[in-house]
Structure formats: structure tokens, C-alpha cells
Image (cartoon, coloured by chain):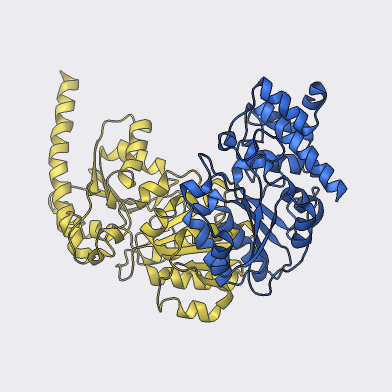
Chain colours: A yellow, B blue
Amino acid sequence: MRNSFISAIHALSEQSEKIMMLVADNGAIVFDEYRKDFPERFVNCGIAEANMIGFAAGLAACGMRPFVYTISNFMTMRALEQIRNDICLQQMNVKIVSIGGGFAYGALGPTHHATEDLAIMRVLPGMTVICPASPLEVKAATRAVFELEGPAFLRLGTNGEPEIYSAESDFKIGRGTVLTEGDDVSIIVAGPLAYDVLQAQPLIKKAGISPRIINLSSLKPIDKQMIQKAAAETKAIITIENHSIIGGLGSSVAEVLAEECSDYFRFKRLGIGDAFCMEYGSHEDLKKYWRLDAASIAREVISFMDVSLRSASDAERKTRN
Amino acid sequence: MEKLTAVARKIRKDILKIAYYGGGAHIASSYSIVEILTVLYFEVLNIDPCCSDHPDRDRFILSKGHASAAIYAILAERGFFEKAQLKTFCQPGSMLGGHPEMHLVPGIEASTGSLGHGLSFGAGIAYASKVQRRKYRTFVLLGDGECQEGSVWEAALFASHHKLNNLTAIVDFNKLQALDRIEKILGLDPLADKWQSFGWHVEELDGHDIHALSAVLNKPVLAAERPTAIIAHTIKGKGISFMENTPIWHFRFPNEAELEIAFKDLGVYDKKEFLS
């Protein structure tokens, strides 16, 4: 995802001389080509994220289009007030690109695990929140946020994420994508766990369940229609994210379901629990720890559907009697 | 100079009027920067009230946003908006809130109110001017208490490292913060030395001396390759006798008896005329 972003921003920087890339002493080597081609537009702001965000806002006030890029927590938490006041309140055209979403930096420990960032960014007025699923979607999302006037948060992993699209992604802000059509359960995912959900699909189908898999990479604005359709047509919804189950994708979907869907449905959030992860390991290891790998996802969906079908028939019996 | 002194006197009256209608304001914090704003807005800044978003305009950022009464008074006097607006301070429907908002008020360059943000924002604006090959100057006015915020020093490191010689920070060094004197809470001395050690060119002056302010602020470039920090020694509450150097006046409105004294200090003889 990281390389996809860098290549996308390089191409965009050839088209627009207003783009500036800001980092906080991160991204060794990967920006070498960018720095060579656009030396005046790359600024390593040093280990000073609060200043970096304020600085970016000042650039944007003069018509530049800065992209701020660093490890998620260091921007979204340390410099949160700057993001809120300097960027969102002042409606500055700054794009915040975070790397290391979820457990992408698994072995580096909880200070580097980005597990609350979506919740924090989502609640800021005026902030567009995008969580792409794959490198091709990152490419499309980068262009989409560049074309957007106003603040945006683009949450990347690191590198090596598998691709889920065979051709270019037709990502649009505010729109979800149905990856697989199905009638029994809607599995709504945001981020690179979309690949794991697709891997889980054959196991789920083997259990006689027809899953509808939805990639909801645009968290804010969110595709309410797609969620409403899922509630009306499949009656069971599971959300999956490499983020806390508090405040991220699951909560966003729950908000829509609770307020705008009157059909009967059952709902469950899968993701990271309300705890810091004290396990070290690769992203794959930590996925297994939190039961977010393909096999665990399949197990969770099947068990949920078993319960869900029983509840549905209970509800049906009560209505008939 | 006489003209500027007269303007400063008028601004002090307007600040009190703003506070009166708003039911209170950070009067003392506003009074310590009156001469600084007067010299900037009536002599130094290349600005045009009719064209408040001209790309080559000089920028002034009130990083100590709680002194909003001061910036509103000066902007109105300079013609950025109607003076009648000052009476709407902090009321429903007004564009003039307790802290200034950039998209609401003509002439306001940054939405401040939370301390420690203005210098980074100003550094971005100054940096942009170099990228875009423009010649405007950027001024950021900070409070001294504000210099207790770590983010100010991140910005200071950045600005000097990147040789932003078109950026000028002015510190309103009135030695007081909200609850007490700075030296008793989180001492800043030696303040000038600190800025110097961060790579800034430093000037120190009496922040109420219009001649001194004019002489320094009018210089187009103060240092070849460094940003400039002007340490302006001021008096919090300057202009109203019982407010001067008295911490309790950080956010407080005078009672009837105090108001009488304030009027005398400011040369207000007709309350009705003052309030109109």
C-alpha cells in the first residue's frame, strides 16, 4: 500500500506543482525518488508532529496541497488538536496519510499499533475518512482525496498487502463496493482484512451460507444505501476491521442500522477488543491472536449465522403465534 | 507618531466597549498589545481592507487568540468591517466570538484560541511564500504564557532550521499569565536567550513605545537567514490603572465603581457617547 501511495503521489505531483509531501523523519529510502524529482516540495519536518500539522495548515492557507505522511498514532493522537483546530476548523486542504493501520507494525509493540485512529478521525467535523483495502484501491483513493477540497484521512497499512482487485479499483468517496453478491449474511469490511474475508469465503460457502461481502473503504462519508440494502436483504450483518470495535467501522455501520433500518436484522462487530495488544509478532501473527485471520473469520461467521438463523426463526414463530 | 498614539487611545476605548457589550473579555491581555497592533496595522503591514485575501498581502496571526477584543478593534478601525459590529461581541448571530475565526471575520488570518498553534501556522505561510516566490511578510504575536507550550518550540526549531527570515514572532512579554506571575508558575527567563539559542535573531524593546516598535518593525528584513523574535516588554492591562500588572484581571469585567475609574483613565467623559 505504501509503495502504491508513493507512486500515485509522484504521478500527481507531476501534474500539480501545488502538492507537497511532509514527513516526520520517517520513510527512509522510499521517498528517495520523490525527493530527487521534487526537492523543493518534500519537507522532513523532524520528530515534531504538532508543528508538522500546523505547518501543513499554513501551506494550505496559501493554496498549496500538502500531504502529511507518518506513522498513524504520532499524527492522530499527538497532533490531534492541531488536526482538529488548524485543519478541520479552518477547513484547510490537508491530506493526512497514515501508515501502519492496525497491526502493520506488529512486532514494534502497542505504541505503534494504530487501533483507535479511525474512531478519532471519524469524529472530527469535516474530516473525510478513507480506509483502502489494497494497493490498487490506495492508488484510486489517493487521486480521489487529492481531487477533494478539504481535509481527508487516508489510512494505509505498510507494504506487501495482497491485491483483491484484478483491474483498476473504481473507488469513490462515499461509495462502498460489493465484492461478492449473497443473500444470507453481509460481511462488511474496511481495510486490508478484505483479503482475509475473501479467503474465508469458500469455508463460509461450504457451510451452506451465502455471504455478501462489502468493502466499505469510505468510512466517512459512509454508503448508507448499501448498508440499508444489506439490512433489508440479508438480515444479518457482521463488520470486520483491524481497529478497535469501538468507534470504527463497526460503530459507523451500527449507527446507520440503528437509525435508518427498520427491518429485523442481527449484527456483530469483529475487530480488536478493548485492550492493548501485548503480543509481539508479524501482522499475520497478531491477526490470528485477535481471530481476524481467514480461518477465524469463517468460524465466527458460521457460528454467528447459526445463532442468527435460530433467532430469526424464533422471531418468525412469535409473529405467527 | 502622534497619530498612532491617538489611534492607540481610541483602540483602548473600543476594547472596553467591546467587553461591555459582550459581558466580558480578556481586557488586560488585549491592552498589553495595543501599541504593537497599532504600529503594525497603521504603518507596517502591507494590507488592504478592500482586498483581504490578496495573495501578496502581509499576514498577521494573533496566536494569543484570547486578545480578540484587540484585533477586532484594530481591524474595525482599519476598515475591515463596520464599527457597529463591535457591539455584537459574543452574542448570538455575531461574527465576533471570544476567539477569532478566519472564515467569519474579514482580516483574521487564523482561527486561534488554543495556545501554541499560531507559530507553526505562520511558519507554513512563510514557507509557502518562498516556494511561491512571493515577497510578503508574516508576523505572529504570541503571549508569554503561551511560550510554555511545547509546540511553540517545535515551531521555533523549524523556522530557524529552514531560515524563514520572512517570519517575525512578537512575544507580548507582560510577565503575567492567568493565575499569577509567570516566574511563580513556570518561569521563562531568560526568554531572549532561549529564542536566540533556538537560532532566532532577537530584538528587545518596550512594547508600548511606538517609536521603538516602528523602528524595528519597519525594517524589511531583520536578519539575513534567520527568523526574528521581538521580545516586547509590556504591561498587562496597560491603560487602566487598577488592571495594570494585576493577575485577577485576566478575565474580569469592571463593576460600576471600577468602570468610573476606567473611564477617567481612558479619557471617557460621556458614557452615552462612549457606548454608541
Q: What residue do we see at 72% from left, 47% from top? A: B107
> How many numbered markers are drawn?
0
Left or right: B3 as drawn, with respect to B188: right
User: Which residue is more in the foreground, A75 or B263?
Assistant: B263
Q: Residue A99, how many percent across, how many down?
A: 37, 63
Q: Is residue B133 left or right of residue A21?
A: right
Which residue does the image show at 69% across and 54% down from the upper left? B60
Residue shown at 41%/76% (left/top)? Answer: A30
Image position of B216 (left or right of A238): right
Q: Position of residue B24 (x, y in %)?
A: 62, 29
Question: Which x, y percent locates residue A178?
Answer: 34, 52
| Most foreground residue, B211 or A287 | B211
Which of the two residues, B188 or A216, is positioned nearer the viewer here?
Answer: B188
As drawn, A112 above or below B84: below
User: Which residue is painted at 55% across and 72% down in the image?
Assistant: B161
- Of A298 and A28, nearer the camera is A28
Whether residue A80 is visible, yes or no, is: yes
Q: Is residue A76 left or right of residue B204?
A: left
Residue A145 visible in the picture: no
Quarter of the image that includes the C terminus of chain A: top left
From this viewpoint, which residue is outermost toward the right?
B2
Viewport quadrant of the N terminus of chain A: bottom left
* Residue B94 image position (x, y, % from top left): 66, 31
Q: Quadrant of residue A317?
A: top left
